[in-house]
Image (cartoon, rainbow, N blue to C red):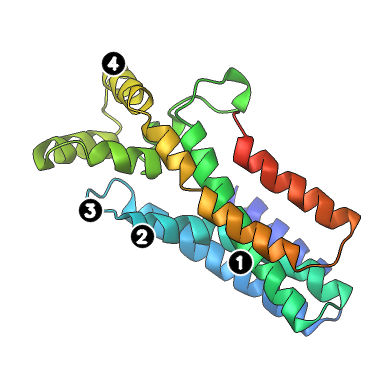
Amino acid sequence: MRLAGDALLARANKIISGYGNTELVSCISEAISSTVTGEILEIQKMCQPNLSRAEYLEIIKGKTGYLIQAACESGAILAGNSEEERRAARELGLNLGVAFQLVDDALDYTPAPDLGKPMGGDLREGKITMPLIHFLQELDSEQQKSFLARAKDKTLSEEELDRAMRRIRSSGLHLRAKEEAEPYLRTAHKALDTLPESREKSLLARMLEYIRYREK
C-alpha cells in the first residue's frame, strides 16, 4: 500500500508540474507537507490523556483543513484571481475542512449504518476526537488513565466500548462537538461572500449548508 501511495503522489506531482505554474506547485507541496505533519501528530498524540482541544484542532487542520485549503486556493491560482481572492479562497478552504472534520468526528458516535464506517470506529482505533475529549473530561484522572491505556492497547471490551458510546450520546457530547463546527462555517461563509458570483460559488455555499445540517 505504501508503494501505491508513492506512485499516486508521483503521478499527482507530474500532473501539477504540467501546468508550468510555480505558485501552484508551491501551494500543493505545502498542503502535502502540512497533511503529513497532521497525520504524524495524530499518531503521536493517539490515546494521550493530556491531549488538549487546541492540539486536536491542530491535528484536524493538518489532516483535513490544509488539504481543502489547497484545493480552493489552487482553483483561484489557475483562474488568475487577485491576491485578495486567493486569501479568501484559502480562508474558505481551511475553515470548510475543519468544520467538515469536526462534524465527521461527531457523527462517528451517531448510529447510521450507511455511513460507510462502523459507529465508534475512531474509538476502536484509539483515536481521540472532540466527542471523546468531552467524555474524558467527565472522568477522574485514574479513570482517564485506565480507559486510555486499554483503548491504546485495543483491549476495551465490546461492553465497555458500547457503554462509552452510549454515555457520549446520552449526554449529548457528540452534539456539543458538532456545534463547535459553527464558528468555522460562519468564517467560511464570510470568506465565500467576498468571491465573485458564479455557479461554483453557489455550489460551495450549498456544500457549507450540507456540512452544517449533515446527519449521516
Residue 159 can be seen in this image: yes
- Residues tagged 3 and 4 counted as in contact (Cβ below 8 A): no
Describe the element under mark 2 as helix, strand or loop.
helix
Q: Quadrant of residue 6?
A: bottom right
Q: Residues within 10 Å of mark 1 (few under 14, many from 20)?
A: some
Distance Cα–Cα, label 3 vs label 2: 11 Å
Give the numbered dot on residue 145: none
Q: Tag 3: residue type?
A: Asn
Q: Which tag is nearer the camera, tag 3 or tag 2?
A: 2
Q: Considering only order in the chain, which callout, 1 or 3, is on the residue closer to the N terminus?
A: 1
Residue that lies at the very extreme toward the top in this rendered image: 159
Q: Which residue lies at the image location 59% right of the left edge and 61% below the top edge?
A: 187
Q: Tag 4: residue type?
A: Glu
Q: Tag 2: residue type?
A: Ala
Q: Tag 1: residue type?
A: Ile
Task: From the image, tell me which residue sits under label 1.
Answer: 32
Q: In which quarter of the image is residue 89?
A: bottom right
Give the numbered dot on residue 54: 2
Q: Which tag is nearer the camera, tag 4 or tag 2?
A: 2
Q: Residues within 10 Å of mark 3 (few under 14, many from 20)?
A: few
Task: From the image, tell me which residue sits under label 3.
Answer: 50
